[in-house]
Image (cartoon, grey):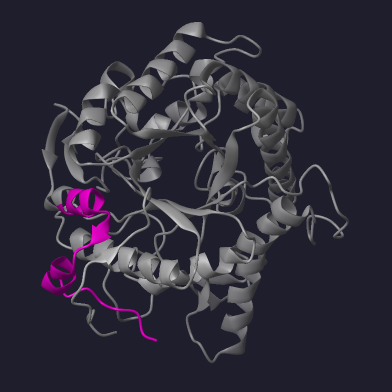
């Protein structure tokens, strides 16, 4: 790749959203009624032995970080609701929790920050998990009821809704790799959960629209752009194509066209599933390179990085994130076929030293700008994340924040990338001087 040749600032469309993204369990603190609060206390479950604890203290004082968003010139934030707070027992809804979420959304709007709300970001109430969670078909109706309550109480403050964050990551980590709760790797159970997630998405979509017809509903879909580790090796190519089919094609076939393709079904149209995306959210971190293995439980492949390339900080499972902005461009090109507005609902990297984040941020935004130049209807970008948070089974060992956090003292220290992102958001453009100063790689033609 060559460095960017442009001498002019690269403008984004008027009204483009510049935001950050977060999830309830990772930032709120003192979530003690979901399955992750139990899991993280198991010896060895979390890489650094930590728990979420107070997290970022948002349940008490999210507004202080909302002030920081406003100071950076951001105009959107994507958060999630904690189902176990809203429905602490089956069928019993907590008015105090709903009031707190209402206060958070009002606080965002008062700062001219558009709120986005996700219903599910990896956590379930303990009572639901005890009933079998997403393996139990009753979860579909329960999820729809929760969506209806959320919309009735919060829908006047929020137009943009996500039913799920990365449903197939949740599926893969729990029922394919077995790393996350419920740690039940089994292909038959995985298929069952996949179907229930699709049905739950559709049921929530219709519930949200019934409560608020003007709501815009989608998902934040993890996009991997699987590629063969050995490009000329037939088995690696087949393994990459199989993963693309399972992790990307199946979901969109169902939610766009209503088709349950094998192994989910025989392709017959399911009208209630069709057209249940008003927009498409892309969560992109890096392309995944796959090497064929004959093990069907690994879906005939394992993932590793090529020997070259620039890497982010490494987590406890899987290869570290590799600099690959071309994969973001390819992800946008892939979803353009579905003719819906596109948002980058998550992108970032773990980089405690903040030595790579500024350049990586610029490189991926340059790829996004190229997609816009090609005619893609991309309307916003959400960086993961504003403040360091609890990163699931990596605990506090991975640092994604524009702002560093000491979880013990709650002290916040802005990293240089925070000011860089502020410069971009305020200008609604990529300044040419920054592209040159950071020697940002341009995409090969």
Front-lying residue, 234 or 322: 322
- Quarter assignment of residue 26: top left
* Left or right: 97, with 64 as reference point: right
The answer to whether 295 is drawn above or below residue 57 in the figure is below
The answer to whether 103 is drawn above or below residue 292 in the figure is above
Q: Position of residue 18 (x, y in %)?
A: 33, 47
The answer to whether 142 is drawn above or below residue 182 in the figure is above
Q: Position of residue 399 (x, y in %)?
A: 24, 47
Q: Is residue 22 visible?
A: no
Question: Which residues are drawn in magenta?
Answer: 420-445
Q: Residue at x 16, y 75 (%)?
A: 439
Q: Residue at x 58, y 46 (%)?
A: 167
Quarter of the rendering occupied by the N terminus: bottom left
Quarter of the rendering occupied by the C terminus: bottom left
Q: Residue at x 33, y 31 (%)?
A: 27
Q: Is residue 431 visible?
A: yes
Q: Residue at x 61, y 60 (%)?
A: 247
- Quarter assignment of residue 403: top left
* Left or right: 126, with 70 as reference point: right
Q: Position of residue 379 (x, y in %)?
A: 44, 53
The answer to whether 322 is drawn above or below residue 213 in the figure is below
- Quarter assignment of residue 198: top right
Asked if residue 263 lies in the magenta stretch, the reply is no
């Amino acid at each position: 790749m060559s460095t960017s040749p442009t001498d002019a600032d690269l403008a984004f469309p008027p009204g483009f959203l510049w935001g950050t993204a977060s999830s309830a369990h990772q930032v709120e603190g003192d979530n003690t009624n979901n399955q992750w609060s139990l899991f993280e206390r198991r010896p060895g479950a979390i890489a650094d032995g930590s728990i979420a604890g107070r997290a970022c203290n948002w349940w008490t004082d999210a507004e202080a970080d909302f002030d920081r968003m406003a100071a950076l010139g951001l105009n959107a934030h994507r958060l999630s609701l904690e189902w176990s707070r809203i429905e602490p027992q089956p069928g019993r809804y907590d008015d105090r929790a709903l009031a707190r979420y209402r206060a958070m959304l009002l606080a965002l709007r008062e700062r001219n920050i558009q709120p986005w709300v996700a219903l599910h970001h990896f956590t379930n109430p303990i009572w639901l998990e005890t009933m079998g969670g997403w393996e139990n078909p009753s979860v579909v109706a329960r999820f729809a009821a929760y969506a209806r309550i959320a919309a009735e109480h919060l829908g006047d403050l929020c137009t943009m809704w996500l039913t799920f964050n990365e449903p197939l990551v949740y599926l893969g980590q729990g029922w394919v790799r077995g790393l996350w709760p419920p740690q039940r790797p089994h292909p038959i159970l995985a298929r069952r959960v996949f179907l229930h997630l699709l049905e739950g998405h559709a049921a929530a979509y219709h519930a949200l629209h019934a409560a608020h017809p003007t709501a815009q509903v989608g998902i934040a879909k993890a996009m991997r752009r699987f590629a063969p580790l050995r490009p000329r090796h037939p088995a690696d190519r087949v393994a990459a194509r199989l993963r693309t089919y399972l992790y990307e094609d199946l979901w969109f076939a169902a939610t766009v066209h209503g088709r349950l393709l094998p192994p989910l079904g025989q392709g017959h149209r399911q009208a209630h599933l069709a057209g249940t995306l008003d927009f498409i959210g892309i969560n992109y971190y890096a392309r995944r390179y796959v090497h064929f293995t004959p093990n069907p439980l690994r879906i005939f492949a394992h993932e590793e990085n090529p020997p070259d390339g620039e890497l982010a900080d490494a987590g406890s499972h899987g290869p570290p994130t590799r600099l690959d902005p071309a994969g973001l461009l390819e992800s946008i090109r892939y979803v353009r076929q579905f003719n819906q507005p596109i948002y980058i609902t998550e992108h970032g990297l773990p980089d405690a030293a903040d030595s790579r984040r500024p350049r990586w941020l610029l490189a991926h935004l340059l790829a996004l700008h190229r997609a816009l130049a090609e005619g893609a209807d991309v309307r916003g970008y959400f960086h993961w994340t504003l403040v360091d948070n609890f990163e699931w089974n990596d605990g506090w060992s991975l640092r994604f924040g524009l702002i560093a956090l000491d979880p013990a003292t709650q002290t916040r220290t802005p990293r240089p990338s925070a000011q860089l992102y502020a410069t971009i958001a305020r200008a609604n453009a990529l300044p040419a001087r920054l592209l040159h100063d950071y020697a940002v790689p341009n995409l090969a033609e």
